[in-house]
Amino acid sequence: MKALKSALVSVAFLSFVSSTSYSQGGNLFPFVLPWDDSSPSVANISGWLHKPAGAFGHVRIGDDGHLYVGKQRIRFFGVNLCFGACFPRKEDAEKIAARMAKFGINVVRFHHMDMQQFPNGIRLRGVPHTRELDPEALDRLDYLVAQLKRNGIYVNFNLLVSRPFVTADGLPKEIEELSWKQRHVVGFFYEPIIELQKEYARKLLTHRNTYTGLTYTEDPVVAFVEINNENGLVHAWLGGTVDRLPKVFVEDLQRQWNEWLR
């Protein structure tokens, strides 16, 4: 035990000396990766990406379980864009797409864009409900997707991530007693919330992109669509969340369960 304590003291001392040395300058130097740099260099691997994304048709799963475009196997190396980052200005969208391509990124996951109103999300500004998409948000999203496609980058749309369903959506007032994540649990079985999710999916995926001329259901640039992010009814039940739901929702779930048992 004494030897272990001595070793820990030694490690702590060396760590302190090392950090002190570096804090005084040491051999450190600034290493910055500019967000808008797409210049040709030995580190630019955008040439590895086939362009435009979707040139060989929709991404599919082969008999061997791997992903393919046409007859060619494809592997994805991607990033998230969240909240307002999903809707950059058009002049920035061009630079962002080119920069990602330089890194070899070939898929972008559009995440958490359903939580807030524009400019921090895709939802319509100035209304109490969560049911409409903002025209400017859609226009910016369309342009970014078109630029990603042009640079060989596919798209992953997340349909339900952090949307806070509210009473103004036509739901019981009890919905607002729950956290936004708990509201999504209700959405596994409560028909009005299921319909709200379908409505959102239709409005987004059947929307025609002004810059590609295709709806998102038609465009092979859309490689993935995630329906519900990090959620599960059984998981919520095991964790006790279902038992703590307001009565109006518990009774509806109980009714459906009893009907299924019959």
Image: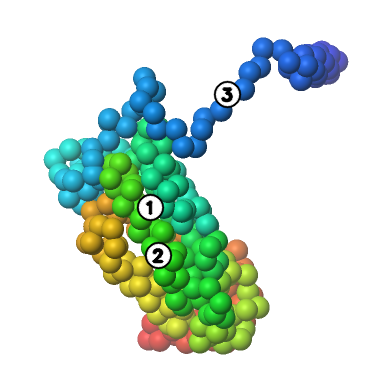
Residue 223 or residue 236, whichever sits in front: 223
160 lies left or right of 209: right
Q: Residue at x 47, y 50 (%)?
A: 81
Up/down of 163 relative to 53, above or below:
below
4 lies left or right of 249: right
Going from N to C along the chain, the mark reached first, 2 or 3, is 3
- Label 2 amino acid? Leu
Going from N to C along the chain, the mark reached first, 3 or 1, is 3
Q: Residue 201 shows which numbered tag?
A: none
* Secondary structure type for disc 2: helix
Percent of width and height locating residue 79? 44, 43
- Label 1 amino acid? Leu
Q: Residue 31 shows which numbered tag?
A: 3
Residue identifier under label 1: 144
Percent of width and height locating residue 253? 49, 81
For the residues marked 2 and 1, what is the alpha-carbon distance in whole angstroms?
10 Å
Residue at the far right in the pictured view = 2
Residue 74 or residue 220, whichever sits in front: 220
Residue at the far front in the pictured view = 91
246 lies left or right of 2: left
Residue identifier under label 2: 138
